[in-house]
């Protein structure tokens, strides 16, 4: 693996030591099972102690980790016969959004998600998972197509945010995101959302208005990145670690706020260590959830989705006469 996480170094070193011993034992045809067993027990303890006590900033690093499974990885591991569809029928095709039709346990579904790369070349091609307006319009086109043919929609969220370039703004970035929010809220088909990595701002929400929202244990979901928050509040992006703690961006925080419905526990050491195990868990949850939703009348489904988002957050309602309007000079 490349670009290893700083707090992960002792674990990586022990994993390498175990592999060296296993290779040596095989090469020399000697029995080192006892020694390897001791190291594996120590490795388990390291992983458990490290990953059960991650700070919010460390979770952000795990969520962004280049080796973490991408949307395409999950598509290949979870679904069968995936047919990728391209273009928004208005401007072009945005590689930062991947989408198409696939089979989930023999059931046709539409899959849409943000796509990041595994190296610099791929990340440049996918624009580091930051969509342009045509990416969101492509996603919406596929969702409306799914509604027409009564296919459930499954969204994978993993983006630092929408692309902030001039061209994107000229082509209507804000309008594209806002339209996705509106149309997803009234989509007449089940919508399931998996926040698999980095959920950045309203740009993540543009693929996250769903009936059920699941979030991986070490994913993050926030109105702004820790670096962006620190730059705005303190004019100092180096205070990102402090900002991460204040933003309440972890799965545990968001479950408590009612923003997500369920946390999906990751394999010990993170999803990047056991992607197949993580994919199997996601697949199981998706199949179970769709089975629960399939008998729900469409009108009730849409109404429940709308009310779900309306209930988020806390606010106060003032009756007439309760609110005192102060003079301007006060």
Image (cartoon, grey):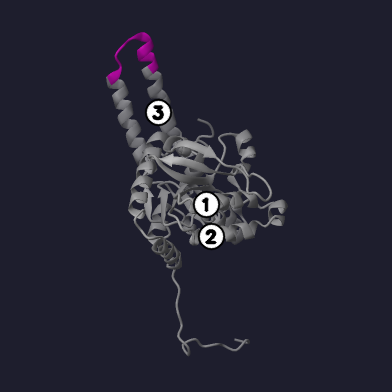
Per the image, label 1 sits on a secondary structure element best described as helix
Q: CA distance from mark 3 to mark 2?
A: 49 Å
- Pointer 3 and pointer 2: residues touching (CB < 8 Å)? no
Height in image: 134 above or below 70?
below
Q: Is residue 274 visible?
A: no
- Pointer 2 and pointer 1: residues touching (CB < 8 Å)? yes
Q: Which residue is mark 1?
A: 143
Height in image: 55 above or below 229?
above
Quarter that holds the C terminus: bottom right
Q: Is residue 222 visible?
A: yes
Per the image, label 2 sits on a secondary structure element best described as helix
Q: For residue 204, which numbered disc appears in the image? A: none
Q: Which residue is mark 2?
A: 183
Q: CA distance from mark 3 to mark 1?
A: 45 Å
Q: Main secondary structure of the magenta part?
A: helix
> Residue 295: x, y in percent?
34, 56
Q: CA distance from mark 2 to mark 1?
A: 9 Å
Residue range highlighted in magenta: 23-33
Task: Locate residue 220 relative to residue 328 in the image: left or right.
Answer: left
> Residue 119: x, y in percent?
58, 34
Going from N to C along the chain, the mark reached first, 2 or 1, is 1
Residue 212 lies in the magenta stretch: no
How many numbered marks, from 0 up?
3
> Residue 155: x, y in percent?
48, 49
Height in image: 261 above or below 158?
below
User: Dot 1: few (<14), some (14–19), or many (≥20) neighbours within 10 Å?
Assistant: many
**Residue at x 54% of width, y 62% of height:** 182
User: Dot 2: few (<14), some (14–19), or many (≥20) neighbours within 10 Å?
Assistant: some
Q: 104 or 308, which lies in front?
A: 104
**Residue at x 52% of width, y 52% of height:** 143
Q: Which residue is mark 3?
A: 14
């Amino acid at each position: 693996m490349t670009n290893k996480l700083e707090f992960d170094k002792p674990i990586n070193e022990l994993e390498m030591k175990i592999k060296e011993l296993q290779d040596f034992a095989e090469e020399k045809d000697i029995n080192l099972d006892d020694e390897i067993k001791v190291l594996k027990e120590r490795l388990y303890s390291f992983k458990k102690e490290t990953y059960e006590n991650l700070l919010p900033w460390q979770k952000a690093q795990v969520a962004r980790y280049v080796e973490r499974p991408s949307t395409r990885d999950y598509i290949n591991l979870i679904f069968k016969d995936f047919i990728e569809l391209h273009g928004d029928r208005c401007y072009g095709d945005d590689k930062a959004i991947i989408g198409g039709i696939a089979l989930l346990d023999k059931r046709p579904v539409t899959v849409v998600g943000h796509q990041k790369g595994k190296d610099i070349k791929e990340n440049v091609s996918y624009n580091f998972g930051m969509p342009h307006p045509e990416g969101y319009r492509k996603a919406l086109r596929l969702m409306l197509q799914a509604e027409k043919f009564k296919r459930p929609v499954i969204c994978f969220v993993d983006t630092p945010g929408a692309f902030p370039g001039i061209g994107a703004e000229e082509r209507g970035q804000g309008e594209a995101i806002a339209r996705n929010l509106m149309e997803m809220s009234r989509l007449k088909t089940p919508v399931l959302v998996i926040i698999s990595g980095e959920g950045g701002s309203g740009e993540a929400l543009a693929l996250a208005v769903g009936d059920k929202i699941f979030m991986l244990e070490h994913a993050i979901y926030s109105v702004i990145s820790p670096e962006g928050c620190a730059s705005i509040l303190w004019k100092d992006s180096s205070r990102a670690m402090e900002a991460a703690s204040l933003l309440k961006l972890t799965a545990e925080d968001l479950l408590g706020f009612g923003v997500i419905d369920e946390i999906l526990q990751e394999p010990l050491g993170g999803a990047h260590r056991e992607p197949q195990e993580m994919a199997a868990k996601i697949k199981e949850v998706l199949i179970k959830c769709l089975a629960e939703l399939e008998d729900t009348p469409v009108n009730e489904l849409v109404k429940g989705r709308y009310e779900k988002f309306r209930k988020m957050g806390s606010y106060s309602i003032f009756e007439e006469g309760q609110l005192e309007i102060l003079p301007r000079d006060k």
